[in-house]
Amino acid sequence: MAVNGRQERVVAALDIGSSKVACLIAHVAANGQIKVLGVGNRACNGGVASGVVVDMDATERAIRAAVDQAEKMAGQTVSDVILAFSGSDPKSQVVEVSVDVAGHAVSAEDLDNALAQAREKIHDEDGELLHVLPAAYAVDGNFGVKMPVGMYGKKLTVALLVLTADSGPLQNLQACVRRAHLNVINIVHGPFAAGLSTLVDDEMKMGAACIDLGAGTTGVSVFAQGSLVHAESLPVGGAQATEEIARTLLTPFDQAERLKTFNGAAIVDPADARLEIEVQQVGEAGRDSYSRQPRSNLTSVMQKELELLFATIAKRLDASGFSGVAGKRVVLTGGGASCEGIADLAGKILGRKVRIGRPQLVGGLPQAAQSPGFAGLVGLLLYETHPELRDMKPSISEEDGQEETKLGTFSRMTRWLRDNF
């Protein structure tokens, strides 16, 4: 049965990260309601580093294992997937176009005409298009219009956020998925998906930044007036803290990850000097394989590394020009957001109110998948089931025939987006 032209269907979402590959299989009703049928989660085992594929065989094996686990739980197989991409360093720009509406009420046809003209100004010679999203509308220079259809004026202005990524890392990721006998039907920027999953409507409207703390990358997405206005990925994440723990405490990398997860914290507590933890020593065996060390040895390393990470994020937000748009709210999500005390540390360094963001509770989502580490994956489902996002990027089947034209420059609407808050 179809509702408003939409059919019931089964959707599979795939998130390939530096530490794990995760898959969700969900049934989407004709009214857009989501019910998760299966979940898969497997370690990537060195296949991806800093969001970029470095071992295609290892990545393919992790994809197959995660999808197979989800299929068994769902009781059905899938061939098409929506893919998250968080690697490389995406470039975002705002393209603006104005059309005359001759003083009559703006119609859907006028809006489509403006969007089509804006799309003609986009070229992807420097990479592949990830998203082309309406960032803002204006009627006769009055910015902040939510939806211009039905409003009267002489001129309609539309600003589109254009997000592109380097083609090499993106093609390598798709190749790994194809080697697992899966077809990529859509690609979504991971930090954007995480924001869709964790930010509430009021946060998106008043202005907020979502920081997706992964193992190999840290994604930043900024929303204002209900739209995405900026996005980027940093090639640093929790793996750097793990490596520093291993070197400082002289422990194997897998043990450093366990110590970080089960004994770590983002801020050193005075009591840490009196608390002892057992640390396996690298290369040692038998009686000498473990040493007892104060917990402060671990937490001091973690605090230092996280302070550097959030200081880098603060600099990148300032450099983007959208620091003011992000307002006073930051939402931390991703696997790294589960660290004890991390919201307090982030708030101190970023100078904003910080909360931990967990994925929206869609139907059937298991308890194990309700943690911040699955926010981006749930966001993929939300993106696919919310056509009002009006993403104007060409479909994957259309991309090869897309004509290149000159990209527009920043304008008064861009400045309004940056300065409005």
Image: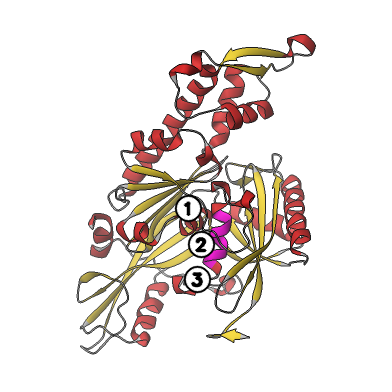
Q: In the picture, residue 279 is in which quadrant?
A: top right
Read off the magenta span.
376-383
The residue positioned 33% from the left and 85% from the top of the image is 110
Q: Is residue 33 left or right of residue 78?
A: left
| Image coords of residue 58 (percent x, y) | 74, 45
Q: Does any portion of residue 239 appear in the rendered image?
A: yes
Q: In the picture, residue 155 is in which quadrant?
A: bottom left
Residue under circle 3?
386
Q: In the image, what residue type sits under mark 2?
A: Leu
The residue positioned 34% from the left and 60% from the top of the image is 202
For the residue labelled by badge 2, is the local secondary structure a helix, a strand or a loop?
strand
- Pointers 1 and 2 in contact (CB under 8 A)? yes
**For the residues marked 3 and 2, what is the alpha-carbon distance in whole angstroms?**
17 Å
Q: Is residue 379 magenta?
A: yes
Residue under circle 1?
90
For the image, the number of numbered tags is 3
- Pointer 1 or 3: first along the chain: 1
For the residue labelled by badge 3, is the local secondary structure a helix, a strand or a loop?
loop
Label annotation for residue 118: none
Residue under circle 2?
130
**For the residues marked 1 and 3, what is the alpha-carbon distance in whole angstroms?**
23 Å
